[in-house]
Image (tube, rainbow, N blue to C red):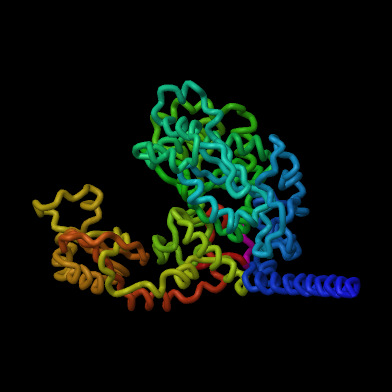
Amino acid sequence: MTSHRSFTIVLFAFISAVVLLITAKRLDRATWDAENFNTDHLNEFIRPATDGTSDTGNAFNASATPVFTTTATVTVTALDTEKSTGNAIPGNKNKDGSKSSLSPARDPACDGFPDTSGILLVMKTGATESYDKLPVQIMTALKCLPDFLLFSDLDQRIGGHHVRDSLDSVLSEAKEDNDDFDLYRLQQECAVDQDNCVKVLEAADSAGWNLDKYKNIHMAEKSYRLRPDYDWYVFVDADTYVSWPNMVYALRRLDPAKERYFGVPTVIGDKLFAHGGSGYVVSRGAMREFAGKNPGIANKYDVEIKDNCCGDFMFAQALNATIGILVEGFWPLSNGEKPFTTPFGHNTWCHAVGMMHHMNSEEISSFWDFERKRYRTNHKPLVFSEVYDEFISSKLRDVREDWDNASDGWFYIDTESKDHAWEDWRIRKAKKEDEKTELGKAAHASWEGCRAACLEHDDCFQFMWHNECCAMHADFKLGKPVKKEDKEKQRYISGWDVDKVKSWIAEKGDCGDRVEWPDVVKPFLEPSEGSSS
């Protein structure tokens, strides 16, 4: 009797286990199939060069290996089509033997994610912010990249990934008696969590900023030493979102053997550099000439950096001084805005989305979800008009109180008023008296007057009134809420000419197959991929 009962219990347990296993597998498929990247329609439109290196218009054909993979597994392999690059992904050739950033297992959310082989993401953060910014990156796009590098001002492990100290190779003479490194020393000596250690430091945010500028050149040198065989190195901040389908699409059309440096050209004094937060891209050819042939190049600038503002600025100066190249425009693929601050209009509407900056964790997560769902049914490159439709269109109002929509195209102010000390830049963009209509002459006096002048102006899509200044803009952007001020004239009142916006969009029409790419990419598109406005 006991034996029969034991047999029955064992048999029941076995059957239950089988049922649970089958159910779990079905649930896994049901959960992820509705959320992954679509793999059925992307291959025709997006495809890499057949040789991976040629900047020629006939280097692409429909039979080329697709940029978007249809495999359900994230693998670390070279593109068969990139014959001249050797191993596009040197996953087994890391100089330090580390593979901590290599994706160890399949994630169903990455099904159909573009094949980024040959393209290395290098992400910069700081120990004061790393636990705020990196987790969402790791939970979204980073989990679909077969390889990437994370750099900070402290050696850490976050979510199983190695965050490297970019400053451990800075010269001692640059650190000694340098207040910029007070935070660095504090972090190294911290006996508990970094958050509690940093709380005792005054102005921790500015301390992090002062330390940040020493990272960029060291990051570049270390990246090349650790991963010397990549075609493209994409440098971003931890609050930068990368739309990988469009980035892969563009970079596949350019020659990584040439010395190239792409980004948003920015000027300090008379010197150009690529804005770091907007993201910049450096080719294999440039990295080899700069870092590969000049070991220790970063130390050459360690002391000099103290008297300069920014690491992205110093990296550009080092590139120019060492190998003689300047930044080439990559806007708006490299872009310092995010959905809520993007100026939508003629200059962005049908342009391809690439990188966006100042994205908090919620925004990164939301955009990631949007992209995954969008690519399930739409195989074309993502453009800004779609971002407007998804994130902005339903939020525009005639008026929003205590709101700054960042209108700064031109101003209506009383330049003779003794109550204001207007900034020179604002005066330069202010309408002169003989340029003002009757409504324009009263625009500065109240938000109602500002709105009336905007509605009258053919080019005004939005206005913002604050402190007897009426600002207008020929693009439309959402902006953000601001604290309500006690005095009425100190409040920010923003608004949009919604009817004018809708009319413009209707006249512009759906972008369809029209996609605008950066000028450096346009010559290498196939005729069918040519853009028109």
Against 157, is 524 above or below? below
Against 451, is 518 above or below? above
The residue positioned 40% from the left and 75% from the top of the image is: 394
Compared across the picture, whether 86 is left or right of 448 comes to right
Give, as a single range, the part of the protein colored magenta: 524-528
Q: Position of residue 65 (x, y in %)?
A: 74, 60
The residue positioned 44% from the left and 22% from the top of the image is: 176
Q: Position of residue 276 (x, y in %)?
A: 47, 45
Against 20, is 283 above or below? above
Q: Quadrant of the N terminus?
A: bottom right
Viewer-proximal residue among 126 and 252:
126
Instruction: State whether the magenta stretch is mostly helix, strand or loop.
Output: helix
Q: Give residue 380's quadrant in the image.
A: bottom right
Compared across the picture, whether 481 is left or right of 194 comes to left
Q: Evaluate whether residue 343 shows in this view.
A: yes
Q: Give residue 522's quadrant in the image.
A: bottom right
The residue positioned 22% from the left and 47% from the top of the image is: 424
Viewer-proximal residue among 240 and 208:
208
Q: Evaluate whether residue 260 shows in this view.
A: no
Q: Position of residue 478 (x, y in %)?
A: 36, 66
